[in-house]
Amino acid sequence: MVRTQLSVNLNKVALIRNSREGNWPDPVFFGRIALEAGAAGLTVHPRPDERHIRVSDLKPLSDLVKEYPGREFNIEGNPFENLMPLLREIRPHQATFVPDAVGQKTSDHGFDFSDPDVRAKLVPVIEEAKSYGCRVSLFMDPEPEYTRWAKEVGADRIELYTEAYADAWNTLIADAIVTPYADCAKLADELGLGVNAGHDLSLENLEPLLKACGNVLEVSIGHAFTAEALQFGFAETVRRYNELLDKIAAE
Ligand SMILES: CC(=O)[C@@H](O)[C@H](O)COP(=O)(O)O
Ligand SMILES: NCC(=O)COP(=O)(O)O
């Protein structure tokens, strides 16, 4: 069982910040709390409309992560919208490609790898991101065939899109839906692809998914993390995730 790493997504800290003038709560301040508490990295999704994370947040966050050797900065976005110039400027450890439309409420699907045009378009931007020193992860619905295509287009990792799993968890059928995620994770291992996971994961629903997959290298968690941090505090929430991740890895 791999010891999965926690990357704290700061989008929702920035969303609260943007509801007023000024820079409080400052994503850098809370990013530092997360890193000091033991988070393996920070994730942000600088959407084109800057509804939460702004382009101006990226360099300060990148500089913050560099103060913590071994921790990683992960920038998510649509490579066919605003992401590539940001990767060229910031050169994060990881770039996670997400096919979100500009005004989309949240990420709600992975790439349509069954479309040869999508696959052809991904190849050069993956190569470009790698030329900036970024590891490339592709946001993906839990379709095992898509894992093969992610490998084919040159990705380093897949990020399993876990909203359907989280929804199933809420209706206690998570055991039934975890199978495609485990199948994708197993195939990824066979193909030499790393496995990340994210979207709607939480302290409550994380364990069965990670145990079923066995090889998830990183979970990026923001929405639930922020709500949990309202209850437990930012540092304590990081501690609880790391305690859970240690427990899962030890079993
Ligand atoms: C790709 C994904 O599922 C999330 O990382 C994304 O960042 C969520 O975006 P919002 O925080 O804007 O809902
Ligand atoms: N890649 C998923 C992520 O960064 C955060 O997703 P969520 O926990 O805000 O749903």
Image (spheres, helix red, strand yellow):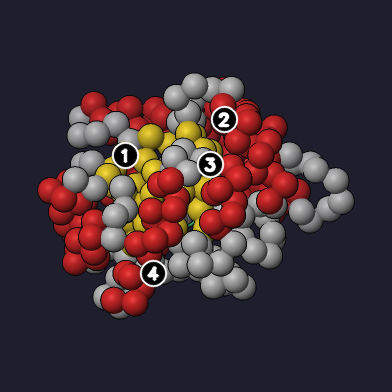
Query: Residue 25: percent from the left, percent from the top?
Result: 75, 41
Q: Amino acid at mark 1?
A: Leu
User: Is disc 4 surrounded by few (<14), some (14 to 19) or many (20+) residues within 10 Å?
Assistant: few
Spatial separation of the CA atoms under disc 3 and disc 4? 21 Å
Disc 4 marks which residue?
121
Judging by the rendered image, the residue that carries numbered circle 2 is 65
Q: Amino acid at mark 3?
A: Arg
- Front: mark 3 or 1: 3
Proximity of marks 1 and 2: CB atoms separated by less than 8 Å: no
Is residue 225 something that shows in the picture? no
Residue at mark 4 to residue at mark 2: CA–CA distance: 31 Å
Q: Earlier in the sequence, mark 4 or mark 2?
A: 2
Q: Residues within 10 Å of mark 1 (few under 14, many from 20)?
A: some
The picture places residue 17, in percent across and down from the top left corner, at 75, 48
Residue 212 screen position, x and y as percent = 20, 48
Taking depth in this image into account, of 86 and 194 the one nearest to the observer is 86
Pointer 3 residue: 91
